[in-house]
Amino acid sequence: MHDAPSAIAHPAGRASARTGGVRLAGDASLLRAPLRVALVGTREPSPEAAAAAEMLACELARLGAVLVSGGARGIDQAAHAGALAAGGRTICCLPHGIGYPRPDLPWAARAEGVLLASLLPPHARPSTSSPVARNRLIAELADAVVASEAGPASGTMHCLRAAFELGRPVFFLRMDGGPELRALHASMAARGAAPLEPRAFATPASAAAVAARARAFAAGETERAAAQGDLFG
């Protein structure tokens, strides 16, 4: 295990500044991957949403994306599983120390293709505030963020707010629901988030659209960093 520098390194100079170090374990080369996509959502998804998230993660991994998520049950674990099932790579941002036991993440000890990241000391337990910080870290590490099934008051919204603040492209699964959920979708769309329809959520076409926006964001960040001489190579 080792600490990352005070900025999270992106390829060719892209970086997201932090006030504290990030502790890492596993394949640190994933921080230099040219394409990283976060896939997040509820801990209690419908079976259809969980399956769709895993399939979308597979499709994104086949396009070369590193999948970023938070290791929680539900959509997060489906995202990690889908990436690994496709022979891809994944970054798991934890709301506790890297040494805290997680028997539900049997793939976490892999030396290649898996990176664990945490803002806490190695054996720290999760706290009431640590998931919020973890969700921001997910957004910082990603070139785009996709939200699967999630409610207006869910922890996923912390990740999406951070993504909007950081200027990341955001996609969301358009779900049927009451007035509160429809208002949430309208608000996200007004901020530039792109809806993904349920029938097309896990298709190669959706994955390609997400990857294209993520690559465009990454390229823009690289150009801006190079222009400013802010290189973390």
Image (cartoon, rainbow, N blue to C red):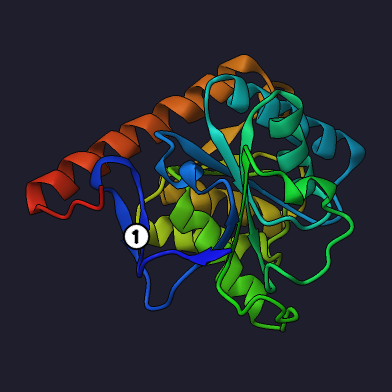
Residue sitting at 43 percent across and 49 percent down? 190
Label 1 secondary element: strand
* Location of residue 18 with respect to 52 vertically, above or below: below
Q: Residues within 10 Å of mark 1 (few under 14, many from 20)?
A: some
Q: Quadrant of residue 158?
A: bottom right
Residue 103 in percent (x, y) is at: 89, 58
Q: Picture quarter containing residue 156?
A: bottom right
Task: Locate residue 176 relative to residue 187 in the image: left or right.
Answer: right
Name the residue at 34% across, 60% down.
Answer: 16
Amino acid type, mark 1: Ser
Left or right: 187 with respect to 104? Answer: left
Residue 84 locus on image (x, y percent) = 72, 32
Foreground: 219 or 166?
219
The residue lying toward the viewer, choosing from 124 and 212, is 124
In depth, the one of 217 and 11 nearer the eye is 11
Q: Report the residue marked by disc 1.
A: 16
Residue pictured at 53% horizontal, 31% vertical: 65
